[in-house]
Image (tube, rainbow, N blue to C red):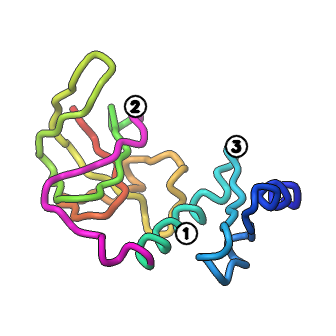
């Protein structure tokens, strides 16, 4: 960690671990993360959300037009093809028709189920049909697993 802080200092930036950073305008927050275990990723997301809420509050707006960011497409036993998305604007309902960009052009499909993980459950753990909360309507912002036929 010290090598990283020194490397930032060589570039003229003050770097501090995010939980020790008292002056966000003056210091760069460092969030240690692991690509192998995923440790630190929730902390980084929390920091980004907090900074956005604090510094961009007057510029944040909600739009009724549906907008999602696809994180992952995978096949889960018992569910079929699922799409993990972050719903950032709009309302998504079970039965809605969606269009997703594919390698060979657009993919048009219907939302068969909207699944969210149990509260306080790790998001990286495999979703099982009986362990997820099934919803009929989602309003932003939310991380959701879409099941399609």
Residue 31 inside the magenta-drawn segment: no
> Which disc is residue 47 wearing?
1
Residue 41 position within the rendered picture, expressed as x and y whole percent measured from the top left: 60, 57
The residue at which mark 3 appears reads as 36
Question: Residue at coordinates 34% horizontally, 38% vertically from top-left?
Answer: 82
Label 3 to label 1, Cα distance in Å? 20 Å
Question: Residue at coordinates 67% horizontally, 44% vertically from top-left?
Answer: 35
The residue at which mark 2 appears reads as 75
Vertical placement of residue 113 versus 12, above or below = above
Dot in front, 3 or 1: 1
Vertical placement of residue 56 versus 116, above or below = below
Residue 68 inside the magenta-drawn segment: yes
The mark nearer the N terminus, 3 or 1, is 3
Q: Residues within 10 Å of mark 3 (few under 14, many from 20)?
A: few
Dot in front, 2 or 3: 3
Label 2 to label 3, Cα distance in Å? 21 Å
Left or right of residue 49: residue 36: right
Residue 136 position within the rendered picture, expressed as x and y whole percent measured from the top left: 18, 58
* Secondary element type, mark 1: helix
**For the magenta stretch, what is the residue range?**
55-77
């Amino acid at each position: 960690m010290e090598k990283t802080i020194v490397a930032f200092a060589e570039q003229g930036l003050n770097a501090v671990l995010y939980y020790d950073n008292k002056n966000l305008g003056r210091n760069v927050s460092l969030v240690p993360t692991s690509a192998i275990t995923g440790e630190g990723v929730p902390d980084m997301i929390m920091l980004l959300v907090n900074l956005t809420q604090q510094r961009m509050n007057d510029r944040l707006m909600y739009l009724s037009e549906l907008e999602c960011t696809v994180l992952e497409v995978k096949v889960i036993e018992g569910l079929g093809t699922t799409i993990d998305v972050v719903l950032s604007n709009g309302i998504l309902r079970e039965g809605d028709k969606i269009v997703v960009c594919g390698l060979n052009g657009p993919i048009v499909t219907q939302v068969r189920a909207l699944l969210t993980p149990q509260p306080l459950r790790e998001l990286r753990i495999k979703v099982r049909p009986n362990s997820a909360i099934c919803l009929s309507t989602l309003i932003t912002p939310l991380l959701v697993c879409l099941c399609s036929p």
